[in-house]
Image: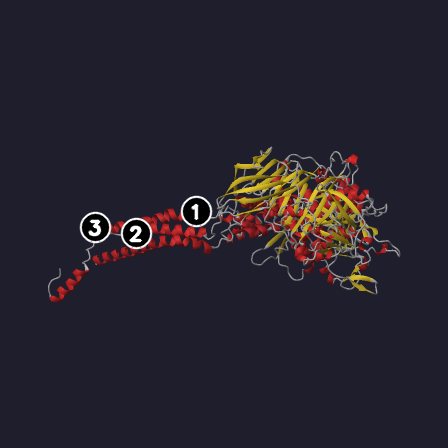
Amino acid sequence: MAITEVERRRGQLAALSIAAVVIIVGVPLWWRTTETYRAWLPVSQIKDLAKLQLHLSADVEVVFARGTVTPEQQKKVPLTQTQDEEHAVDGDLLVQFIILRLQNMKPYRTATIMEEDALKKPTAAEADLSLHMLSESPCGSLVVYVIPESSSLLPEDVNVYIGQRRTALVRISAQMRVGKTLEQLLAQLEPRIKQVLQVMSFSHTDITVALSDRVRFRPGNKESIADSMRAFKSSPGYEITFSLLNPDPKSHQLHWDIEGAVQTYIQPLLTKLSPLANFSIDSQTLYYTMLGVTPRFDSSLEAYTLNADSLAHVINPVEARLGSNAASSNPVLNFLLYVPDIRHSPLYIHDHRKQEVPSNAFHSPRWGGIMVYNVNGFYGSETEFPVHVNINMAKVMGVFLAQLRLLLGVQSLSPPPGFLVAPCGSTGLADWELDRLMWSRSVENIATATTTITSLAQLLDQIGNIVINDNIAQQVSSAVTSLQLAMAELEVGNLGFALQYSKEAILASEKAFFDPSLLHLLYFPDDQKFAIYIPLFLPMCVPILLSMLKIVSEVRQRRREKQAKKE
Amino acid sequence: ILSATVDAAADTQGTSAPETVVPSSVPQPKDDFQEELVIRPLHSGDIYASFQFRTLWDTDFMRENKVSHYRLFPKSLGQVISKFSVRELHISFTQGYWRTMQWGQPFIPSPPGAELWVWFQDSVTDVDATWKELTNVLSGIFCASLNFIDSTNTVQPSASFKPLGIGNVTDHSFLRYATLPREIVCTENLTPWKKLLPCGSKAGLAVLLKSEKLFHSSFHSQAVHIRSVCQDWQCKTTSWELRQTVNSVFDLHNSGQAKREWSLFKMFSRTLTEACPLASSSKLYIDITDNPQQFELSPATSLLSQAVVLGDRRTFSVYDLTQETTFGSVRSLNLLIRWKSNEGEMLRPLLHAERYVAGYGLQTGEIHTLMYNNHPYRSFPVLLLDSVPWYLRLYIHTLSVTSKGKDNKPSYIHYEPSKDRVKPHLLEMLIQLPPNSVTEVTVQFERALLKWTEYPPDPNHGFYVGSSVISSLVPSTVAMDTNSTRERPLFSSFFPCKEESSYFVRIYTEPLLVNLPTPDFSMPYNVICLTCTVVAVGYGSLYNLLTRSFQIEEPNPGLAKRIANVIRKMRGVPPL
């Protein structure tokens, strides 16, 4: 009997040691060899970013001209003052609560002699120019000059003048000044300056629009939704394509001096906008390209008309001919000049109230603009065809430039009462308008990049099969670093750097998100995996499990026997 | 090749189109568009139609501030040229194989499938990366699978593909050549091709390019060639030339109901009504060299032009589409050719080639390339280019070139061995073909085993090996014809004329279809199952041996003993 007992113990030990080998060596080996490589991602930092707590601050310098503060007040002018303002933009109720803090650091000071001289110029525009010559204020900052009521710079009913650069003139009224302490004066100036800041830098609505991807709109905000949907999304570059559509080259020979026109009208604006994005301009002439809609003949006008309702169908057939951009993947802004063929000429665009549109043009949000250019003035009674037409580029470019401003998001907002905004000069864009655009673009870029990074992190978290390369991990971390830097720069008001970093963040995040290596093992279904494992694992594990069960039951039985003996 | 010579010929005869008068206020456009269609009735009874559209643009894409204002030149191609610093680009899509022996030489040769060769500017630093990006962009523009071009099917020929435009570049590290013999060409490739034309398919000769008829043909090839050319004979200024071509061979026997009659409408289901208004010249040429013995034309035209095409002097009837009179009173041109007889001998092409795979089994094989020199008394050299994928492992020591039963040693051999999964074999040879002979090039190969994910869908169809390319300067038949004094005065005919003495020909052989050993694709799973079962059986018995406890058992009493015991029990006797 002893021999069988020894045999039994040996068998049990063998089973146990095999089980131990399988568990200690086999399982880790199998685990390691079938593991997908997943590089480390800064998940906690991404989670922090997802809250999107933005702090924006703009430097505002308030300069008091002579005659606005008394000498004794002058001495007491405080050096700095910080103003915090919290704006909560209601986001998705569950996840985001976005806090914006408008922080205005205001070094108050009195005007220097040279500035005094500049302020004595006869008109506000000249004063603006000479103040600009004196000191160039950095991107994103503002200088507010407080001028006395007696100053002749501003017309009667105007209290605030906003120049072409980054300066504003604020007239202080008599009753504000008389017999009051400096603190009271400053307190009264406060709302004015805030208004100026909202016009020249950023306002609550701007930021809401820029964050439109992240924020659910409250009803009633329709106007800003329309605005935000019209402008192109922020992108590191744009391709602008001007196309001349000549559906009837047999009757019209068209010549447009597009090269000169671009140089004269478009290039100054784009040069001004160059910190924002890279622009490239192309033009082409397309023949035999018809609009998608047959215009209706209006006998009262003796002209063909396109209704506002049918404009939506115009673009599609034309777009097939426009050709995609082979050189880059940036968004394309299309501007089409359509010269109607001789059988549908003249052609006018009618708006919803059946009124002729004076510019004879329309634009399509986030796509481009179309202008109809009638040439029937060139048809004489005995004209020989083809008619040679030299297109009046000034007229055309005026329309396209206005559309370009709209599509790029340069909004011509209506200033509050009492404000006078200087007309924009030859560049087509004032410095502060550029700043406004840069503010909202930085915020938009940051929002987009965080959304991309967050969703990538979520996706990688949910699907364990995806391989995360070192390359992707590096892109993600560089995106996160750029985002943090951009937010830090926004907080201290370095607008230029903030925009730069936000662009880098977008590029890196998109690169990581669209990396093709993420897809390699995505569709490796589990059922196939198990189908391959079963022939090996089933015959190996069943005997081990059975002998384990047997051992356990024997051990239990022996214990019971022992207890029985004791009793 | 044709349009230049033919235009020169036409101009000397004073038949060029009148220039449209442009008012002085309008700047003279720097671009120019020409279109032409050549129709040649072939001896086999088929019809060969060759469209050529040429856009010339006097500009420089490599300027500092980039060119961006396009008129006749398509914007997408212009952007490609300037972005990728392309010096020359040739791309062709072909469905069907050009049968040189039946049809003669095509005006623009092309191999079956897709072919792309590009010369880059020497300013390009990373040619391979640029090439990869370029093929991806072109694949988008032409809706073709050019994105499958990678290092495994790209070669850098050292001699066969010289630039066709100006610029004598010799550094072939800026050249890339690739073919995709498997590519199938259809409407989706033709539509983007037509979009590149200034008039689209709305006016001019391109009206005839209707895909339902065009792809119902024995041979269809469409191509785009971009190069820079001289503007004047001194070559002071250069301009960019975009040449778009369509070559088709229509099978007359299939569609003609045994009647040997043919018209534009029958072939294209369209007639011509106008020239493209943007074209400075728009002409239709009919090759009537064999007229009037064989066929008659209606409406007849009085305009004739002669040109030496591919070493042969041909006569063409010319229809100038910019003239109103061409279209007659019905305002449409429906050209009709009626055959009278089908006699006549075709001049055999002086050079042609064929290729096949020999051998049996799935392990080794042999590629045979046969090159025929049909010239009765002159030998000439040819450049043979072979690009063979890596999965056919060439045994280069078995390479043999024989003509007339004798060893023919190539005067130049350039061979780059393949690297598995990285690059293909490249073999270039300069071979002298003796007169009236067949030269055979053979090389043995071994078929490689691919990884199971490397097989394409339908692997039993076989694997294509691109055509061999044979480039040569072939002695001209005009020069061969020294006895002819038909049109030329005696004093001019003693020495063969220098310009016409030889002409450049590029011919492509058939692509090969090679079967590779193809596994059963459920094999990996079967193998896994089988090994697992074997392992499990081995493991199971081992486990059993190790864990079973053995004990000696009383041997079982035999059946006889048991029966005996039962009986003893019944009798009351103690058991055994």
Q: CA distance from mark 2 to mark 3?
A: 19 Å
Task: Please name the residue that numbered disc 1 is placed on.
Answer: A32
Residue furthest out toward the bottom: B570
A456 on left or right of A180: left
Residue type for callout 3 = Ile
> SS class of the residue under badge 1?
helix
**From what the image shows, is residue B415 above or below residue B318?**
above
Mark 1 — on which chain does it sit?
Answer: A
Q: Would you call the spot at circle 1 few (<14 residues within 10 Å), some (14-19), or many (20 or more)?
A: few
Chain letter of the residue carrying label 3: A
Q: Residues within 10 Å of mark 3 (few under 14, many from 20)?
A: few
What residue is at 80 percent from the left and 55 percent from the top?
Answer: B327
State the residue in front, A271 or B363: B363
The answer to whether mark 2 and mark 3 are in CB contact below 8 A is no
Amino acid type of the residue tagged 1 in the rendering:
Arg
Pointer 2 chain: B
| Circle on res. A3 | 3
Label 2: few (<14), some (14–19) or many (≥20) C-alpha neighbours in 10 Å: some
Distance from the alpha carbon under mark 3 to that under mark 1? 43 Å
Q: Give x and y (percent) for residue A332.
A: 69, 50
Q: Position of residue B571 (x, y in %)?
A: 11, 66
Foreground mark, 1 or 2, reads 2
Q: Which residue is the site of mark 2?
A: B544
The residues tagged by marks 1 and 2 sit, at their Cα atoms, a distance apart of 29 Å
